[in-house]
Image (spheres, rainbow, N blue to C red):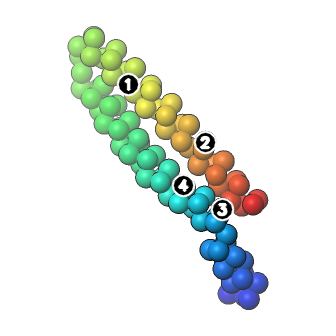
Amino acid sequence: MGLEKLLNKLGDMLDPDVVLRKKKRKKLKAILKELKARETELEGKLKATDNGRKVDRLKKELGIVHKQRMKGVSALRENRGKEKTG
């Protein structure tokens, strides 16, 4: 690893904005992992359910979880873009 690359890494470690973005990114990834698990769990329940009311409720909940996950994914991408350019 070259000297310039090492200095850049050291600068990133000392820059509070970069450290904060990395922490936020790590938390966001954990949340997204939980949402993905919840989404697959709901899909499984939806496939196993025949009750009409329960199906409607599960579809609504699945839609909400999916939208939340997509918002998180876009936030993660935005954060990554700032990390690369900033």
Distance between the Cα atoms at labels 4 and 3? 10 Å
What is the secondary structure assignment of the residue under circle 2? Answer: helix
Q: Could you tell me the amino acid type at mark 1?
A: Glu
Pointer 1 residue: 61
Label 2 vs 1, first from the N-terminus: 1
Q: Which mark is residue 17?
A: 3
Q: Which mark is residue 24?
A: 4
Of circles 4 and 2, the one toward us is: 4
**Residue 5 image-quadrant placement:** bottom right
Label 1 vs 3, first from the N-terminus: 3
What is the secondary structure assignment of the residue under circle 3? Answer: helix
Label 4 vs 3, first from the N-terminus: 3
**Residue 6 image-quadrant placement:** bottom right
Pointer 2 residue: 74
- Label 3 Cα crowd, 10 Å radius (few <14 / some 14-19 / many 20+): few
The answer to whether residue 45 is left or right of residue 17 is left
Distance between the Cα atoms at labels 4 and 2? 14 Å
Q: Could you tell me the amino acid type at mark 3?
A: Asp
- Label 4 Cα crowd, 10 Å radius (few <14 / some 14-19 / many 20+): few
- Label 1 Cα crowd, 10 Å radius (few <14 / some 14-19 / many 20+): some
